[in-house]
Image (cartoon, grey):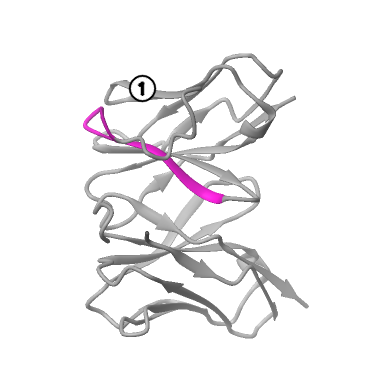
Amino acid sequence: GEDVEQSLFLSVREGDSSVINCTYTDSSSTYLYWYKQEPGAGLQLLTYIFSNMDMKQDQRLTVLLNKKDKHLSLRIADTQTGDSAIYFCAESGGHSSASKIIFGSGTRLSIRP
Amino acid sequence: DAGVIQSPRHEVTEMGQEVTLRCKPISGHDYLFWYRQTMMRGLELLIYFNNNVPIDDSGMPEDRFSAKMPNASFSTLKIQPSEPRDSAVYFCASSPTVPARGYTFGSGTRLTVV
């Protein structure tokens, strides 16, 4: 079945760039997403990219998609303490159902001074 | 727009008791999803509805779990009888269409079964 994998932890210094990586297995995925979850809250959609794109930029966020390698990354420029959260990579539109979003296990981003 | 509203925010119950979690999706959204989040298993899709009809319940762990959507503005997830391993955060999410732009999640219900 479909699988989305990402590393569990990332620590960066305040002001540096954070890069969170993700791999997925379903080559028919149509949309790929990045969600952010702050403590005690639900998941918030940060950005998404359609599979025929290879890059999307939105202010401090840059998403890169390598469809050949089934690799997705999220770069956060000038990382701030408010960026501390769990970041989920997700995909939809794959073989199982166009309606279901499959989530990775999340990467916990911590910011050190 | 009040977003997706879940109640209660926290629920503590004793093993064997019935638990009902509630969700009000965003008005006009056709899809509603129930997810469960645990440290061990991450985010699991339990069931989803389209226009109030259950489409895929393959993620519902056991017969103790049931979900209903009697109308477009309300859904429930029921666990009867509850067990300690059901302790988790349960999220409801809704989407206006096949989720091209992603779901909107509620704040979740933290369930503790003792």
Left/right placement of residue B32 relative to residue A28 reads: right
Considering depth in this image, is A22 or A87 the residue closer to the camera?
A22
Residue at x 61%, y 54% (from the top left corner): A38
Considering depth in this image, is A44 or B89 the residue closer to the camera?
B89
Residue designated by label 1 = B68
Would residue B76 be visible to someone looking at this image?
Answer: no
Which of the 4 image quarters holds residue A50? bottom left
Would residue B91 be visible to someone looking at this image?
Answer: yes
Which of the 4 image quarters holds residue B86? top right
Residue at x 32%, y 68% (from the top left corner): A26
Which of the 4 image quarters holds residue A4? bottom left
Instruction: Give how far across and how far down residue B100 sits, in percent.
Output: 25, 57
Q: Is residue B5 above or below residue B68?
A: below
Q: Which element is circle 1 on?
A: strand
Instruction: Give how far across and how far down residue B106 sits, in percent.
Output: 47, 40
Left/right placement of residue B78 relative to residue A17 reads: left
Residue at the top extreme, as displayed: B17
Amino acid at the residue labelled 1: Lys
Instruction: Give how far across and how far down residue B105 sits, in percent.
Output: 44, 44
Give the magenta range: B42-55
> In the picture, which quadrant includes the C terminus of chain B?
top right
Residue at the right extreme, as displayed: A113
Left/right placement of residue A86 relative to residue B97 reads: right
Q: Is residue A91 above or below residue B85?
A: below
Q: What chain is tagged by disc 1? A: B
Considering depth in this image, is B81 or B94 the residue closer to the camera?
B81
Instruction: Give how far across and how far down residue B52 sits, in percent.
Output: 25, 27
Q: Is residue A51 magenta?
A: no
Q: Is residue B46 magenta?
A: yes
Left/right placement of residue A22 relative to residue B52 reads: right
Residue at x 63%, y 68% (from the top left corner): A8
